[in-house]
Amino acid sequence: MRKLMVVGNWKMNLTSSTASELAVQIRDGSTTNTNTVEVVFCPPAPYLKLVSGLIEGTSIGLGGQDVSGKGPGAFTGETAAEMLLDVGCKWTIIGHSERRTYHNETDSVINQKIKRAIQLGLNVFLCVGEKKEERQNNQTEALLEMQLNGAFTDLETSALERIVIAYEPVWAIGTGLVATNEQAEAAHAYIRSWISTRFGASVAGDMRILYGGSVKADNALGLLSQPNVDGALVGGASLDAKSFNSIIQSAADSSSTK
Ligand code: 13P
């Protein structure tokens, strides 16, 4: 059985003091059995070390929000995989739609980042998802296929053990327009079938596919109960400890039905 995951993408929010408060409130407030649900925080880069110290000795994991596809050197403003590992990260997000949109990240850049992150020993949340027009034009699967083809170019099957896919429809991110349970399930099933065709049924069966886009305490259970939805990548609601802990609880509740 795939272990459910609930991941908080804090994006470019918080201060060192509010980030600490949030980390501690979630750490101490969650009563969920960590054998059932895996929890990861992705704070802004300047707070990684701070949050790392606060979750040390717990089962909560730490991830970067992005990573460079290059090795350490003259790349102003970038963060190397070595640096994420150095401050306690086991994870990094790659290919978030905000990186694709505001930083022109192409599938080939994303592929380079994935390869390097995995080579260095990080686990990856690979984000994919269609824009509103693409959904309206029935191009969701074509777009997902293109992004998956690009991201997985020249990847060995063994690399997939380190990858979790996050399906994040762009129109649902930060808009309150959450995908319906059926829309999420259909996209996740498509992604799993793509993985199965390319890498085999066993790899596809083990692959965790998270949903992201306006996940809140009141819609999490329905989404997480879908057979192909293995967790949530949460933006806005991850900044509120009560909401985030309630989403973690929904994941635990849904796992008993799978
Ligand atoms: P929201 O939960 O704020 O819609 O953000 C989703 C997201 O982009 C997570 O990576």
Image (spheres, rainbow, N blue to C red):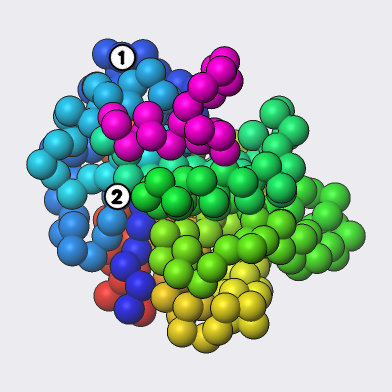
Residue 201 lies in the magenta stretch:
no
Q: Is residue 176 visible?
A: no
Q: Is the CB–ligand 1 distance for label 2 below 8 Å? A: no
Identify the residue shown where x is 33% and y is 21%.
Answer: 47
Q: Residue furthest left?
A: 57
Q: Residue furthest bottom?
A: 201
Task: Give amino acid for label 1.
Answer: Ser
Q: State the residue position of label 1.
A: 16
- Closer to the camera in the image, 46 or 178: 46
Q: Quadrant of residue 153?
A: bottom right
Task: Give amino acid for label 2.
Answer: Val
Magenta residues span 66-87
- Judged by its main secondary structure, the magenta piece is loop
**Is residue 143 placed above or below 96 in the rendered structure?**
below
Element at label 1: helix
- Nearest to N terminus: mark 1 or mark 2: 1
At label 1, counting other C-alpha atoms closer than 10 Å, the crowd grade (few under 14, some 14-19, many 20 or more) is some
Q: State the residue position of label 2.
A: 39
Q: Is the CB–ligand 1 distance for label 1 below 8 Å? A: no
Residue 71 lies in the magenta stretch:
yes
At label 2, counting other C-alpha atoms closer than 10 Å, the crowd grade (few under 14, some 14-19, many 20 or more) is many
For residue 124, the mark is none
State how far apart marks 1 and 2 are (Cα).
20 Å
**Is residue 110 placed above or below 98 in the rendered structure?**
below
Identify the residue shown where x is 61% and y is 46%.
Answer: 112
